[in-house]
Image (tube, coloured by chain):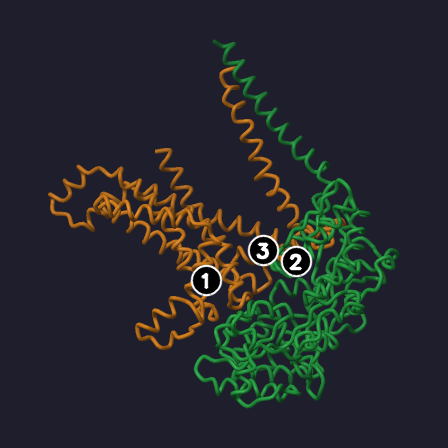
């Protein structure tokens, strides 16, 4: 009796410890095997890079590298930063990752990416310059440009005709047109779809009047939202929020085409790829123009786009660089351009087309600006500081006071 | 000697797993709350020891106290409403006929089983400003001011929507648990009470309630713990609208500090504070539970 109990206890203990040990072994074995035969590429956004391009990339990579597979994962923009922060320092790091151009500084400044300065020449022509700067830290290039997009205004040609309006040439004309379209439309109609927390489009009014978000003064960042120029632009924007739109005061910049598709808005502002989300039956009525500047030409708009970096902890450094070379190859750059994404190699920019959409894109991109290239900027974005700032303005708060408070907050966060 | 060893040997794997899964993160969090741990440390830099600095920064931050106050208020409202509705539904369940009971149980089960994000998406559409059903129904009923009413801009309205959703998701658990407890109430005593002339409310208060009290206590305990650290619903709603800095509760604030702003040390310090707060709030109920089980 006692012996049986002893045997049972011993068996239970052995089984328990054995299982635990086996569990430990499995996880260890898995990571070392997965490292060298699969190259992992993380792309941002479910649809931003078109499937034609990714299919081509996969085919070319696998035909050039026998026995290796290219695994492409698409990460939602909203989760990208958190997933990068947790994966890049780990053993299961992806090999090549796409980051937003404004997010690149957060990673280049702490050694998350491999230094590509010496190998950059092998990639060929690389631009735009502001993207190269965004990927550079301490004079070393860590993240190379991937594609650029610009944002411009999409409008309904019939709405303009009915209101007797021409494509506006100055920002003041645009503001007036938007308000007139709302008055003419009546009810729930928006002259210009302007969600309250949409700062990525709203900031164009600040830039157009010569203002800025924050500039670096020596070693410190100084907030510029309360400068006279910025306040002028913000006040114009606040007017529009009040008189030209019926969009929610806490709306974000997601899917701005929805109300246009429903016939409830005459204009909306979005990156170039928004064109394909406009409803089929509205496609003929759709036109585009770059947001006009204060005096003439195009307003500086927020430059959209991404950079690519190789994870410093990746075990496939050479393979990863081969992938970058494929991305910078003429074929891939042409695929990007034909799909409306600005290529890093400006030789192919003309392939983006010469219709009014391509013209608007190229004009808008010529005077684009970036957010402050501080490593702490991604924390500012995650804390929704700019969204809350514009939301407060849309709700009618005093421009000068709110701008001053936000400047203080920006300085506190950027100078950490 | 051998007789005592057997059970402990069987418990060994369970303890080991618990120790690793629960103990390690807890110890790591405690240690991290006394260090400086930001993005640089995440990517390999050493973490300097800063003692109580994180806690000091946390307790002198007025935002933090705002978050704590709101979380306590939110927890209190949600627990009370959930327990009231859940218990009421359980009593209802006991009284209705078979078909009605089955229908209610199935619909509650589906509510409980629905994945949080799927449910949140539906609720978001219900309360949507322009195309939401709720605004449409209220406008049709004659409340013109609800045309394109924005439910998430005002902070208290934001919490109203959050409460509706969290209560909706929590009620099934309370209902099923209390219903199970109600089946244990002795029918004989209830009949005797009725014969003696006690009203329904008196019967509930003096016969039913004492019998189901331990179950109510445990359910309330669980609800307090869950509602204090509610995260998914608030985080999702913040992504839809409203002003995040004014609507943070403990769960989302810790997430923002840690994963959002890469200040893992502050997030750890706040998490330790929440742990202590939870223990303090539930100590009374835990003690009464232990007393009951001893008796």
| Label 1 environment density (alpha carbons within 10 Å; few <14, some 14–19, many ≥20) | some
- Residue tagged 2: A44
Q: Chain of mark 1?
A: B
Query: Farthest residue toward the bottom?
Result: A164
Judge left or right: residue A121 versus residue A153: right
Residue under the image location 63 percent in, 87 percent down: A168
Q: Nearer the viewer, mark 1 or mark 3?
A: 1
Does mark 1 fall on the same chain as mark 2? no
Q: Nearer the viewer, mark 2 or mark 1?
A: 2
> Can residue A111 be seen in this snapshot?
no
Which sits in the foreground, A335 or B205? A335
| Label 3 environment density (alpha carbons within 10 Å; few <14, some 14–19, many ≥20) | some
Q: Nearer the viewer, mark 2 or mark 3?
A: 2
Which sits in the foreground, A278 or A13? A278
Which sits in the foreground, A155 or B113? A155
Q: Secondary structure at mark 2?
A: strand
Residue A82: quadrant of the picture: bottom right
In the figure, the shade used to draw chain A is green
- Residue tagged 3: B255
Judge left or right: residue A341 versus residue B106: right
Q: Chain of mark 3?
A: B
**Where is residue B114 drawn, in percent x and y?**
43, 49
Q: How far, Cα to Cα, is label 1 from label 3?
A: 22 Å
Image height check: is B146 above or below A13?
A: below
**Where is residue B234 drawn, in percent x and y?**
49, 59
Which quadrant of the rendered structure holds the C terminus of chain A?
Answer: bottom right
Residue under the image location 59 percent in, 26 percent down: A19
Q: Which chain is orange?
A: B
Q: Secondary structure at mark 1?
A: helix
Residues at discs 2 and 1 in contact (Cβ within 8 Å)? no
> Can residue A151 be seen in this snapshot?
yes
- Residue tagged 1: B124
């Amino acid at each position: 009796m006692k012996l049986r109990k002893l045997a049972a206890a011993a068996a239970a203990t052995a089984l328990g410890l054995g299982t635990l040990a086996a569990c430990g072994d499995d996880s260890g074995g898995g990571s070392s095997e997965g490292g060298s035969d699969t190259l992992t590429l993380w792309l941002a956004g479910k649809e931003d890079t078109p499937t034609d391009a990714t299919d081509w990339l996969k085919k070319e990579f696998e035909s050039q590298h026998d026995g290796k597979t290219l695994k492409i994962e698409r990460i939602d923009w909203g989760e990208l930063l958190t997933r990068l922060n947790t994966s890049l320092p780990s053993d299961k790091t992806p090999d090549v990752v796409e980051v937003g151009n404004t997010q690149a500084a957060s990673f280049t400044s702490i050694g998350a990416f491999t230094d590509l300065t010496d190998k950059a020449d092998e990639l060929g022509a690389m631009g735009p310059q502001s993207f190269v700067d965004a990927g550079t830290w301490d004079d070393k290039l860590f993240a190379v440009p991937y594609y650029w997009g610009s944002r411009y205004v999409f409008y309904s040609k019939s709405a303009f005709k009915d209101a007797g309006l021409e494509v506006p040439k100055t920002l003041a004309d645009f503001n007036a047109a938007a308000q007139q379209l709302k008055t003419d439309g009546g009810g729930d109609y928006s002259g210009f779809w302007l969600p309250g927390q949409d700062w990525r489009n709203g900031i164009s009014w600040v830039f157009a009047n010569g203002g800025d978000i924050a500039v670096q003064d020596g070693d410190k960042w100084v907030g510029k939202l309360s400068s006279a120029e910025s306040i002028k632009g913000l006040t114009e924007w606040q007017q529009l929020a009040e008189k030209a739109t019926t969009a929610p005061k806490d709306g974000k910049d997601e899917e701005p085409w929805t109300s246009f598709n429903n016939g409830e808005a005459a204009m909306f502002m979005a990156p170039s790829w928004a064109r394909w989300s406009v409803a089929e039956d509205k496609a003929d009525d759709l036109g585009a123009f770059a947001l006009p500047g204060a005096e003439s030409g195009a307003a500086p708009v927020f430059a959209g786009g991404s950079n690519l970096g190789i994870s410093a902890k990746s075990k496939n450094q050479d393979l990863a660089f081969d992938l970058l070379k494929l991305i910078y190859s003429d074929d891939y750059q042409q695929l990007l351009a034909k799909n409306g994404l600005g290529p890093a190699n400006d030789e192919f920019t003309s392939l983006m087309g010469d219709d009014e959409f391509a013209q608007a894109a190229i004009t808008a991109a010529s005077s684009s600006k970036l957010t402050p290239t501080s490593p702490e900027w991604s924390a500012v974005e995650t804390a929704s500081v700019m969204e809350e700032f514009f939301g407060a303005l849309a709700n009618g708060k005093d421009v000068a006071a709110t701008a001053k408070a936000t400047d203080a907050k920006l300085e506190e966060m950027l100078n950490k | 000697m051998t007789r005592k060893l057997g059970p402990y040997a069987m418990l060994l794997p369970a303890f080991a797993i618990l120790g690793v899964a629960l103990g390690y993160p807890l110890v790591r969090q405690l240690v991290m709350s006394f260090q400086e741990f930001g993005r640089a440390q995440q990517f390999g830099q050493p973490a300097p020891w800063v003692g109580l600095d994180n806690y000091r920064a946390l307790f002198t931050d007025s935002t933090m106290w705002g978050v704590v106050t709101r979380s306590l208020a939110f927890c209190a409202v949600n627990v009370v409403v959930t327990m009231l509705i859940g218990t009421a539904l359980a009593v209802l369940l006991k009284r209705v006929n078979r078909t009605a009971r089955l229908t209610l149980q199935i619909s509650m089960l589906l509510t409980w089983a629905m994945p949080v994000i799927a449910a949140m998406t539906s609720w978001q559409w219900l309360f949507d400003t322009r195309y939401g059903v709720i605004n449409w129904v209220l406008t049709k009923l004659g409340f013109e001011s609800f045309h394109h009413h924005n439910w998430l801009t005002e902070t208290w309205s934001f919490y109203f929507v959050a409460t509706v959703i969290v209560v909706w998701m929590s009620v099934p658990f309370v209902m099923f648990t209390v219903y199970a407890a109600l089946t244990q109430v002795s029918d004989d005593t209830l009949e005797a009470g009725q014969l003696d002339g006690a009203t329904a409310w008196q019967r509930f208060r003096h016969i039913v309630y004492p019998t189901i009290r331990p179950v109510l206590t445990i359910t309330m305990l669980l609800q307090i713990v869950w509602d204090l650290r509610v995260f998914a619903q608030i985080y999702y709603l913040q992504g839809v609208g409203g002003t995040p800095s004014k609507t943070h509760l403990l769960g989302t604030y810790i997430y923002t500090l840690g994963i959002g702003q890469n200040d893992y040390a502050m997030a750890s310090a706040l998490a330790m504070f929440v742990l202590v707060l939870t223990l303090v709030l539930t100590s009374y109920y835990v003690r009464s539970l232990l007393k009951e089980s001893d008796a």
